[in-house]
Amino acid sequence: AQSVTQPDIHITVSEGASLELRCNYSYGATPYLFWYVQSPGQGLQLLLKYFSGDTLVQGIKGFEAEFKRSQSSFNLRKPSVHWSDAAEYFCAVGARPGSARQLTFGSGTQLTVLP
Amino acid sequence: DTAVSQTPKYLVTQMGNDKSIKCEQNLGHDTMYWYKQDSKKFLKIMFSYNNKELIINETVPNRFSPKSPDKAHLNLHINSLELGDSAVYFCASSEGGGIYNEQFFGPGTRLTVL
């Protein structure tokens, strides 16, 4: 079965600084990979996903993520963080062929943005 | 206009009680889900319905019974609540049941069992 690890429970950055959130997965083949964001009091919103092809994927809100097979990683990045980016971020990995029951979420990284 | 809505947002109840959480989506999706997010924030799928038909039923105690009266609604009824049921429950919907279809989540219902 697949698994996903988000090593950083909490990250604090200053507004305007760059951001990288780490995600490592365990799966025997190329998985489906996702990043979700959960703002306070809200449900999860999909930021971006990787299924195949170009390993650098662009998402909404200026986020991008890079799939690195050799490192089993799918780190999320943003060049300049805005105060509104403060939220909880979840990485998820899905096994093929891709039933919803095969989607595994990480435990999340809480992002705090300092003014 | 809220895409996926859940009621109530907060639910505090005593052990042994029966409670329901309601979910509605106005996106026209044919697939709906219930997820449980535990105290460590792990999110795990419980159920999935496609066109009112149950297609995913993970290892969830049978005290939990989902009901889908129509495509736009998926309710969760929980009997004989236990302390371990305390969690945040999320409803979600998608167009199609594969994980390649984006899921849209509701705001969650925080259930506290005392």
Image (tube, grey):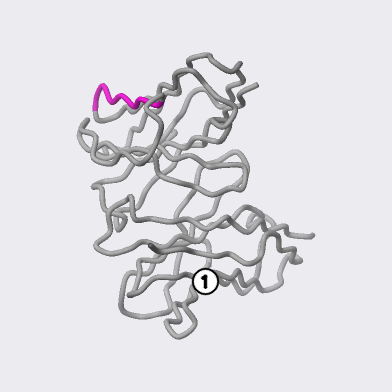
From the top left corner, tell me how far across and down residue A84 is, in percent.
65, 54
- Residue range of the region highlighted in magenta in the rendering: B64-70
Mark 1 surroundings: few (<14), some (14-19) or many (≥20) residues within 10 A:
many
Q: Is residue B68 magenta?
A: yes
Give me the residue at 67% from left, 60% from top. Answer: A9
Which image quarter: residue B13? top right
From the top left corner, tell me how far across and down residue B9 is, in percent.
55, 27
From the top left corner, tell me how far across and down residue B30 is, in percent.
23, 38
Give me the residue at 31% from left, 75% from top. Answer: A52
Q: Residue A46 or A96: which is nearer the viewer? A: A96
Q: Quadrant of the N terminus of chain A?
A: bottom left
Q: Main secondary structure of the magenta part?
A: strand
Secondary structure at badge 1 equals strand
Report whether A65 appears left or right of A100. right
> Taking A53 as reference, is B66 above or below it?
above
Q: Residue furthest right?
A: A115
From the top left corner, tell me how far across and down residue A23 is, in percent.
54, 69
> Taking B11 as reference, is B102 above or below it?
below
**Chain letter for mark 1:** A
Which image quarter: residue B55? top left
What is the three-letter code of the residue carrying label 1? Asn
Q: Which residue is mark 1?
A: A24
Q: Residue furthest bottom?
A: A70
Q: Is residue B55 magenta?
A: no
Q: Quadrant of the C terminus of chain A?
A: bottom right
